[in-house]
Amino acid sequence: MKSPLVLLSLLGAVLLSSPVNAARLQSWNFNPAKNQLSITTDSEVKPRAFLINNPTRIVIDLPQTSLKSDTIRKNFGSQVKEIRVGKVDDNTTRIVVELAQGYTASPDKLVVKGEAGSNWILNLSAIEKSDTLISTASEEKVFIPISNNSNFAGVIPLNKEISQLDTEIKKLMARYRSLSPGMFFLDMETGEYLDINGEKIFPAASTIKFPILVALFQEVDAGRVKLNETVVMRRDLMTGGSGNMQYRKPGTKFSLLETATRMMTISDNTATNMVIDRLGGKNRLNQRFRSWGLQNTVIRNLLGDFKGTNTTSAKDLVRVAALISNNKLLSSSSNTKVMDIMVQCKNRSLLPVGLGKGAVIAHKTGTLGRVLGDVGIVQTPSGKRYLAGIMVARPFRDARAKSFINQVSRLVYGYLEQPLSARKF
């Protein structure tokens, strides 16, 4: 029989040799038009970045971060020859941006800018043509500065994570082991927040209608769309699932405002397709979502997307709420109209159940057989405001997901509605 000392030594060796990943690379996107690389992880990381020549490569290492796939290689055109995403070792994910021959980048013009430790942007506008041939003997690393902004969505300073809520909700999660949730809540007064798998990607279901509505009102503000204009319900836009417009005759005409209102209040899928069509289609909307900093929100198919190919995350949805709450995306008039529409949401079975009497929520739910979600802006009777986003993957039609969301909402509301001096369990 081995001695306790030997057993402890063996255990230590196993632990040291095992990967200890605290985060996962959730998504990345390169926009050639802006020469901008965006990176999202599902929790906070502390990246390292450096420049190497021969050929010119910008390397970003994400320590303690896992990668779900094998090495990925993508070509992007004249300036960026290739982007590679792979593993340095079991604990480190590496992203390499290799520039095309004849292009270089000055390290003093490069910076990796972060937001809240899980969203990172490398702006490559400093790429320039070079007539100088760099010696192939040099492989020196020149480190690139990392700048981490604690503001969420660039508008709300994050203060501290609410440890009491984190503990209570993780206890709740342990009782609902069949569910896989992602959530993000943010107190707009204090900057306190709760982030549990906030960047986790889920089928968006009907929560995708929230950013679509905001995009519509951006077009209204730009004068390219009018709410009183007429849209025609074409046969190719009609679909099943939620809503009653599907039962009207093809060719029926509606005002754009009525169509958008039905999209949000009764979650009409046909209405949603009509709005997507009026805004130029899913590709144009996806470009707009990326311009807002959404890395996980993508429309791949028209509604109803019963297979769940359209995606989002709780943190992306709350990001949209933060941006409109601070008038970063919409005029005050359009913001008011969006709120007026969203408070009329007919499905009150998720976040609203956990709110106290007199609280008001402007929100949008999403329901598929294997996912439930809700995103909202909550105003408490005492005048406090907070942003709420929750998505829950579940066994098919498992009613426990609804109960879980109700209980999370109740815990968050109970904590945030207390006076600041009493915020503890």
Image (cartoon, rainbow, N blue to C red):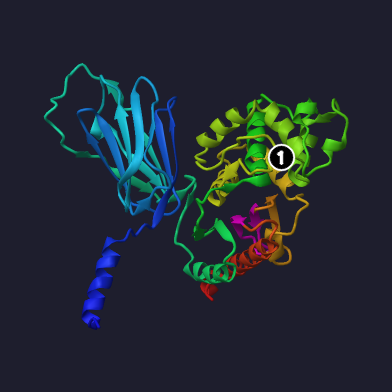
The residue lying toward the viewer, choosing from 394 and 2, is 2
Task: Give the percent coordinates (x, y) of residue 350.
Answer: 69, 59
Name the secondary structure under disc 1.
loop
Task: Give the percent coordinates (x, y) of residue 181.
Answer: 57, 58
Q: Which residue is mark 1?
A: 304
Q: Give the extent of the magenta segment.
A: 371-393
Task: Give the percent coordinates (x, y) of residue 82.
Answer: 35, 28
Extreme-front residue of the structure: 1
Task: Give the percent coordinates (x, y) of residue 271.
Answer: 76, 36
Q: Amino acid at mark 1?
A: Gly
Residue 390 in the magenta stretch? The answer is yes
- Residue at point 64% right, 65% down? 404
Classify mark 1: residues with Cα within 10 Å, few (<14), some (14-19) or many (20+).
many
- Residue at point 62% right, 69% down? 414
Left or right of 408? Residue 84 is: left
For the N terminus, the quadrant is bottom left
Left or right of 39? Residue 56 is: left
User: Where, by quadrant of the figure, is residue 95 drawn?
Assistant: top left
- Residue at point 72% right, 47% down? 342
Residue 70 in the magenta stretch? The answer is no
User: Where, by quadrant of the figure, is residue 111 drawn?
Assistant: top left
- Residue at point 54% right, 76% down? 425
